[in-house]
Image (cartoon, grey):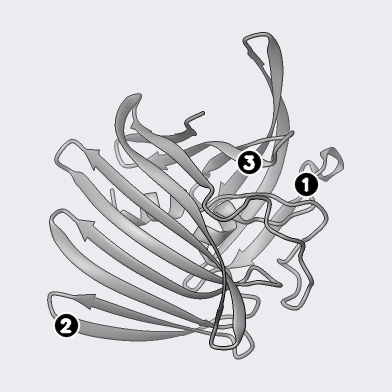
Amino acid sequence: MTLSIISFAWRVFFIRDKTAWSEEIGRECRVLPFEAGKRFLYQVHFNGIKVGKIELGYQGRKEIGGIWQDIIRLTSDVKIIKLFQIESEELVFMDRDTFLPLKVHRKVKFLGREESILEEYEQKEGRVRIIQIKDKTSEERLFRVSPPIHNVLVLYFLYPLDIRDEAIGRTYEFNLPVRKIGIRLKETRRISAPEKIEEFYILEGSPRRFEVWLKKTERLPWRVEIPAFLGRIVITRVE
């Protein structure tokens, strides 16, 4: 089990109508579907056992270097037996108009060891620069990626895609710094809840076959399932 499992898992979709930014960089987007200071709490389970929590918060919009940017903050605290212990904090800076990532600051404590990661996205040039600092040493890597370039966290929490029933079966592809992933609208699903029936869009990703449940009425992520080493990780929203 690696850090990438939680990192990959915890980046999914505040879906917004009629805006598909997998196709172009400059498309105008509407405002975010939540206000500054809004927080969302999720519980993490491994094979049915609660092992931690993840919290997302919208920090608001700021002008940085002459560019208006939306900022989201994500923290996680997960411990799976003695095999996997992680605490992390991430700040993601996104272009106000496209919601494409500009910069990501990540601090991670994994199995007691701390590291800091900075990702800089040069969308027009098709480059991502990743600087990793660990054990007082620094390593810099440069990736060339076809734009638009996405970030996993932004994809999970800000996925402006024109989702509707007629799109069931369609697959969308996104370029990440080190890989390309596909997300398919698999089906709709109705679940009986006390005094009402909830409806969800079910999305399936590859290559890890993660599954995301999006509540149709709010277009918010309610459940994420990810296959993991020796089991399955399930992330669910706390009301």
The amino acid pointed to by label 1 is Ile
Height in image: 10 above or below 19?
above
Height in image: 186 above or below 183?
above
N-terminal of the two: label 2 or label 3?
Answer: 2
State which quadrant residue 122 falls in. Answer: bottom right
Image position of 4 (left or right of 1): right
Horizontal and vertical percent position of residue 74: 42, 55
Q: Are marks 1 and 2 in contact (CB under 8 Å)?
A: no
State which quadrant residue 104 falls in. Answer: bottom left
Query: What is the spatial separation of the Cα atoms under label 1 and label 3, in whole angstroms?
Result: 12 Å
The residue to which callout 3 is attached is 220
Query: What is the spatial separation of the Cα atoms under label 2 and label 3, in whole angstroms?
Result: 39 Å
The residue to which callout 2 is attached is 137
The amino acid pointed to by label 3 is Leu
N-terminal of the two: label 1 or label 2?
Answer: 2
State which quadrant residue 8 falls in. Answer: bottom left
SS of the residue under disc 3:
strand
Q: Are marks 2 and 3 in contact (CB under 8 Å)?
A: no
Q: Residues within 10 Å of mark 1 (few under 14, many from 20)?
A: many
The one of 188 and 217 positioned closer to us in this rendering: 217
The residue to which callout 1 is attached is 163
